[in-house]
Image (cartoon, grey):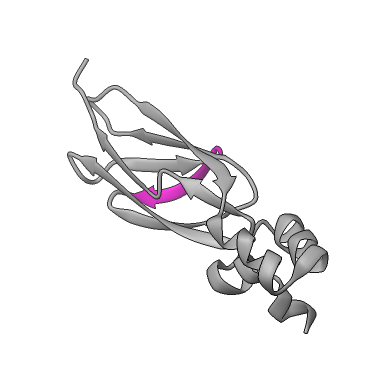
Amino acid sequence: MVTLSSCATVVCGIKQDVKITSQPPGAHVKINGADSGVTPTVASLARKHSHSIDVSKPGYQPQTRMLHAGMNQWIWGNLLIGGIIGMVIDFSSGGANRLSPGEVHIDLQKP
């Protein structure tokens, strides 16, 4: 019953898939300083925190984008179903958040 009362966590989960692309493709991706592959890629990121995405490729200027954790609209389902317990679960798990933007595209520029 407790799990079912946390609407945002049940509906959206505690992670969000974020598509990361670049022009040109094949750029190196670091998320929060950790190697995360090359573009295009999809990263499964915790909704609870904001994330820094660094994209670089030899011969191009590196670029950084931020993904911000903001309010997930499913949190309002707790008013109908989960009440306070559901809201506590959603906020503690990160399910109360969504990452924005949901996709990242970076046009790399030559120096």
**Membership of 36 in magenta stretch:** yes
Find residue 106 and report its horizontal and vertical position in percent: 28, 36
Give the residue drawn at x 57%, y 62%: 74
Q: Is residue 97 left or right of residue 66?
A: right
Q: Is residue 62 above or below residue 9?
A: above
> Which residue is nearer to you in this view: 1 or 44?
1
Give the residue drawn at x 34%, y 55%: 41
Find residue 108 and report its horizontal and vertical position in percent: 23, 29
> Which residue is nearer to you in this view: 57 or 19?
19
> Which residue is nearer to you in this view: 27 or 52?
52
Q: Is residue 65 above or below residue 48?
A: above
Find residue 44 and report its horizontal and vertical position in percent: 49, 59
Q: Is residue 68 above or below residue 44?
A: above
**Membership of 89 in magenta stretch:** no
Image quadrant in which you'd find residue 4: bottom right
Find residue 95 and report its horizontal and vertical position in percent: 63, 60
Q: Is residue 42 left or right of residue 95?
A: left
Give the residue drawn at x 57%, y 44%: 69
The outermost residue toward the bottom is 1
Q: Is residue 63 left or right of residue 33?
A: left
The outermost residue toward the front is 80
Prevailing secondary structure class for the magenta stretch in the rendered image: strand
Quadrant where the C terminus sits is: top left
Q: Is residue 83 left or right of residue 72?
A: right
Quadrant where the N terminus sits is: bottom right
The span picked out in magenta is 32-38
Image quadrant in which you'd find residue 84: bottom right
